[in-house]
Amino acid sequence: MSIKKKLGMGVATAALGLSLVGGGTWAAFNDTATINNHFAAGTLDLEVGHVNQGANFDLTNMKPGDSIKRVFNLNNAGSLAIKEVLLNTTADDFTQGDGTNSDLNEFLKQFEIDALKVDSENTDGKFEPRESIVVSGQTLTLYDLVNASYSGKIKSDYIASDGTGRINLAPLVVPSGETALRGIPVVPEDMDSVMFVITFKDDQTRTGGAYSEFVQNKFQGNSANFWFNLEATQWDGMNLDSSHGSGAINNGVQGSSDADNSTEPSQLVKPGSTVSEPVTD
């Protein structure tokens, strides 16, 4: 074979080699993967239900010595645990009527809270006797509730933790080992009830002598409306570490989380248990 032909084959071989390299690049192996993430906000939903009669009533057509009792339930109808149910009371729509009193606050002072109780928590969950949130020996009135002037009259365990001074109807103090029952959890289900009794106090004081008018006559014809305003709050946010399985941040811990244990959800008390044990994903 001549040198000329050898060089031609060499060129052809070189060109074929380049073609093979190019073809290999087009046919390279490939693989892809997708991490499926789902983000959805939970729901915070306080449902207020009444027992027998509605929890609302007005103050019209009452006389001294009359009292009225109401019970209402606090249910967690959402997917997130409720930390506190905070109460503030407002009053409005005052009407003087035939009475000489024209001061709403003076009228509200005539109504004493003979009972204000919420369900307590216990270890078996079968019976939760109601406990008074009013300090023994103290007299609480509608005026106190409306004007938040109940310092020293409401037990400290039932004062809101957010600094507003409101009354917490879902106490955070529970028996030892029952962390998951604080507030109103989703799991275990733990409905709380609130009971209150309001009495139009019977003041026998008279304006003058033995047979003079009673001082309370000035309130005849007075009327007003008042409201119990409730706010349900969430627990502290939780930090989900990379070591936590599927990443179910609030699904395995429906009881509660606070600043002391929110970083490690697995260290919370497992719902339904009485001892601290890891919550598995």
Image: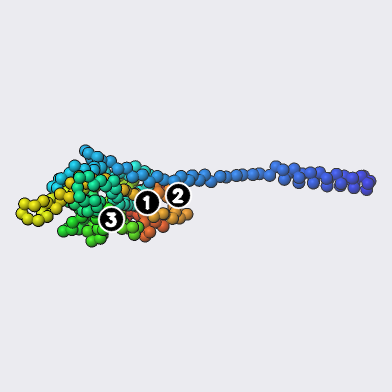
Instruction: Identify the residue at horizontal 86%, vertical 47% (top origin).
Output: 10
The kind of residue tagged 2 is Gly
Name the residue tied to disc 2: 247
Disc 3 residue type? Asn
Question: Left or right: 112 with respect to 262?
Answer: left
Q: Is residue 278 or residue 41 the one in the foreground?
A: 41
Q: Tell me which label, 3 or 1, sits earlier in the chain.
A: 3
Label 2 – label 3 distance at C-alpha:
45 Å
Label 1 crowding class (10 Å Cα cut-off): few <14, some 14-19, many 20+? some
Tags 1 and 2 touching, CB below 8 Å:
no
**In terms of depth relative to the viewer, which is nearer, 211 or 142?**
211
What residue is shown with label 1? 234
For discs 3 and 1, the disc positioned in front in the rendered view: 3
Point out residue 126 in the picture as x, y percentages from the top left corner: 21, 45
* Secondary element at image label 3: loop
At x 17% / y 48%, what residue is drawn? Answer: 200
Q: Nearer the viewer, residue 10 or 242?
A: 242
First in residue order: circle 1 vs circle 2: 1
Q: Quadrant of residue 167?
A: bottom left
Which residue is denoted by mark 3 in the rendering? Answer: 147
- Taking the spot 18% from the left edge, 58% from the top edge, the residue there is 138
